Image (cartoon, helix red, strand yellow):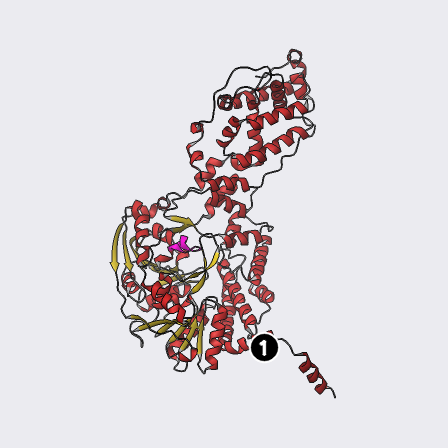
Amino acid sequence: MIRVPRRLLSMSGGLGPLFDRVLVRTLESTQQTHRGYRSKAHQGEASNASGRGGTRSNIGDKKILPEYAVSNKADRNAALNKIKPREIEPESNIYGALGEEISGKKLDKSQMIAKLNEFYQLPSVRELAKSHFIEDKLFGKVFISFRRYCYKSDSLPPELHIKFCDIIDGHGHVSDLFPFFLSHARAAYPHLECYEELRKISDLGKPDTWYPLARAKQRKVIFHCGPTNSGKTYHAMNRFMNSKSGIYCGPLKLLAVEIFHKANDNNTPCDLVTGEERRLANADGYTKATHVSCTVEMTQLTEPVEVVVIDEIQMIRDPGRGWAWTRALLGIPADEVHLCGEEAALDLVKRILMPTGDMLEVIRYNRLTPLVIEDKPLMDLKNVRSGDCIVCFTKDSVYNVSMELEKLGHQVAVVYGTLPPGAKLAQCRKFNLLEECKVMVATDAIGMGLNLSIGRIIFYSLMKTTNDEKGNRSQEYLTTSQCLQIAGRAGRYKTAHETGYVTTFRPEDLRSLREIMSRGVQSIERAGLHPTAEQIELFAFHLPHLSLTDLIELFIDLCEFDDSAYFICDLENFKLLANTIEHINIPLRARFTFCCAPINVKFPFSVAMFTKFVRQFSIGEPVTAGWVRRNINWPCKPPKNLEELTHLETVFDVFELYLWLSYRFPDIFPEPDEVRLLQAELDEIIFSGVSQIVSLIRAKTRASLPRNNNQDRQRRTQQKP
């Protein structure tokens, strides 16, 4: 209740419009706002306000909470607690003595603090706060800020001043402060005011409903499941080649390029679309072909097609890229959707497709050639034979094994993940075609996308560094799926090695290998999801003061989804890039796009060039091929050691980044053709370096040896005249 002194009522005409506006605002904001809150807060504990009597009923009943607030997960509350508040500065003397004149009383700040402390102690107030998403930890933070604001302000807003006076005089209850407390909380933490909207935006509970074009079709899904070298992809691709229109979605650029060439050689006009490259089959350079071969992230969802082939569907579980397979599976508007991959994905695919109404057909395949686990381990590199591939899981192991093999007189082909695609293919051709080079040393990069005539796979180790869904790294044994994928590369159908063999280097690993490969492949439980740029933009509309990293973290913590079937893909690299360019002023959509760029954040040079690209974008300066040459110190020289080879691979990645950006921001990155020529030249330099890898390893070894000071002194003495 607001009490206005009679003397002020009588002189209201003298105060004129100012008094009218303040009084009306005071009455409306206090009484109308209270209407919704007092009915709950005043059901609380027995009154402790002086001069007030009676009892109050307990408001601990959770029925007053919104349904979703009761069921919220604990980590969502933690997310809200992590948000940095806006600083609410105490008021200077902007209200003057208006509150004092209206109430007829000067506010005693010691009494005010006492009443605030009573407010803080009320369980009913805390329950009411929770219904507005202010949990206990956040409640304490807001209260400290609110109390500081009240105490430090030279003059409080008139309505708050009047309310304190009423409570101190016994004409109000401390719970009447709640609307002011809530307003302060929303000013400090703006997400509280739009929490319901944020929850709706971040609702990932029904991903099947995101793709109306696909849902408008009665799709037939054919799952071609089987092990490596079973012919499953061959049969799916036959349907692709003979369709009126189609899309091939591959896990690697190498595979997309291979299908592009095969389709066009088969007189099936096919375009190529990857993150870094576009090639049109039609000679005019403008008309789209009926078929497209693309990397899975580049799949278009807007044009209906007859057939789509989604390769390596088991990668739907990939911690970083799984979202792209989920999107393709649910979103492509095709009459027929052909899935190729491990049977481990079958149960998950059934669950994901259940709400869509799509028909599912399963075709199982057996391996076309035998795969035999040998009785003995290799034990010594002297025991390698023609057609062997030794699989390592670190680049250092690849280097060391390669050096030892060349000491034994073997020419070695080398393949690892960061090697550019052209150099990988050249190394594969070297292994497949040259009689003098019949031994390969590789990482698990050979697991897909490369056609190799391998007779025997030798696991140098069974331990691999893995990343989980949250980005945590650990050393773990290979899974059955990983072992079968890699071992299955031995004994390819219609090659010189129609029986595949597999063994280990160490005796102690052979028993483990047998055990791992004898297990049934564990079913894939969950598929990846990823926030879209549109969703993050909507978050930013409601919370414009938050950085992109904070928006992403808040989105992840607030989003709701079926965690029995889905997970949120790892966004650590995204957030690292967002933090790196946070100080650069660019629009949010562009910032989001830059942070999706394919860049290895482990290499400082790549991150530095990425930052330079963003800075050029921010000032509107085109990044020409000449600019790139100057900033990478072109021309690049052949590498003299492993460090220089690694740097050249990083420069290659910078070229890839430029090409990727040229399709998103063509005005700022206008010379992709010139950069592609530089990249081709660098690819040859890197291939030449890898071909001389043993000499590079020796150069590294010499550089790491301790220097002999006595020999150095003798050498300098001999050189003196």
Residue 260 occupies quadrant: bottom left
Q: Position of residue 186 (x, y in %)?
A: 55, 33
Q: Is residue 692 magenta?
A: no
For the C terminus, the image quarter is: bottom right
Residue 209 occupies quadrant: top left
Q: Is residue 320 magenta?
A: yes
In the image, which residues are magenta? Answer: 316-324
Q: Is residue 584 above or below residue 370?
A: above
Residue 629 occupies quadrant: bottom right
Secondary structure under tag 1 reads helix
Q: Is residue 260 visible?
A: no
Q: Is residue 621 above or below residue 560?
A: below
Residue drawn at point x = 60 percent, y = 38 percent: 86
Residue tagged 1: 702
Q: Position of residue 682 (x, y in %)?
A: 51, 71
Q: Position of residue 351 (x, y in %)?
A: 31, 48
Q: Residues within 10 Å of mark 1 (few under 14, many from 20)?
A: few
| Three-letter code, disc 1 | Arg
Badge count = 1
Residue drawn at point x = 49 percent, y = 67 percent: 676
For the N terminus, the image quarter is: top right
Q: Is residue 367 above or below residue 611?
A: below
